[in-house]
Structures are given as C-alpha cells and as structure tokens.
Image (cartoon, rainbow, N blue to C red):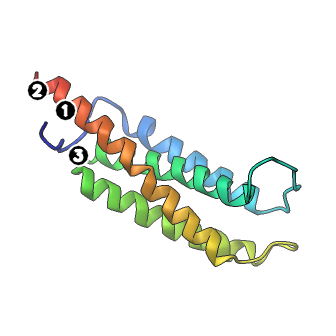
Amino acid sequence: MATPKSFSRARSPAALWLPPFFVMALIFILSSSVLPRFQVPIPHPDKVAHLIVYGVLGFLLGRAAGGNWGWSWKRAALFAVVVSSVYGASDEWHQSFVPGRSIETIDWAVDTIGAALAQVPLYFLRARKAGVRNN
C-alpha cells in the first residue's frame, strides 16, 4: 500500500477548520475556571483528560491541514503536533492568571503526547482512503 499524499479536497475549509477552533475555544473556556474534582476509578484523571482533549485537537488539526492544504501526512502531522503543543503551552501559561490554577509542565507534555498519538489513526485513515482511490 502506497503512503497517501493528501486527503480529498471535497470538504470545505469551514468544515475542516471550525472543529479544531471549537475545541481550542472549549479548552480556553474550561481552563479559565477551577473545575470541580470528581472521584473516578482511574489514576490521574486530569492527565487522561489532557491526553484525550489534545488528542482530539491534534486529530482535527491534522485532518484540516491534510484535507484543506493537501499536505503530505508527515507535514500535516508535524503541523498538528506543533500547533497543539504550542497551544497547550499557552494554555498552561493562561492558567497561571486564573485563581486556583497553576502551570504544570507535565500537563503540557501530556498535551503534546496526546496530539502526537492522534496522528496514528489519521495515517491509517489516509492510507485506507488512498487505497480505495487506487483500486
């Protein structure tokens, strides 16, 4: 199976770019206040939340960059991880101004890992789509 070069350009820019901007706005809103602590049966639930939310953001950014700009998977993935990581760092900095919140470097690292891990399913989705087109 050949490595796919780009997603189909059938989606409009708004359909590709609004979802990641919505997630970024949601992150900003949630980090602007102190969130209640819930008892859940998993270790480090805040880290799991960071991993999931930034995984979604990384996935959506990679999808948008690959689908709208026609970038290769590697370039779109790098863009998604870098933008998610920078946004995660800026979010941690933003939290330093919110009473009851603080900067946690480990949160930023987990944000970056989540965005990076999200590129794996994007690769397989693009490969499958390219394989369907080539058959």
For image coordinates 30% across by 44% down, the residue present is 123
Q: Identify the residue under disc 1.
A: 130
Residue 43 falls left or right of residue 86: right
Q: Note whether 99 is above or below 126 in the view shown.
A: below
Q: Position of residue 36 (x, y in %)?
A: 89, 55
Q: Tell me if I can see residue 29 in this picture.
A: yes
Depth check: 30 or 68 in front? Answer: 30
For image coordinates 37% across by 48% down, the residue present is 120
Secondary structure state at the residue bearing disc 3? loop
Q: Identify the residue under disc 3.
A: 70
| Mark closer to the chain start, 2 or 3 | 3
Depth check: 63 or 3 in front? Answer: 3
Q: Position of residue 50 (x, y in %)?
A: 64, 57
Badge 1 amino acid: Ala
As measured in the structure, the alpha-carbon distance from the residue carrying label 1 to the one carrying label 3 is 13 Å
Q: Tell me if I can see residue 8 in this picture.
A: no
Residue 134, disc = 2
Circle nearer the viewer, 2 or 3: 2
Badge 3 amino acid: Gly
Secondary structure state at the residue bearing disc 2? helix
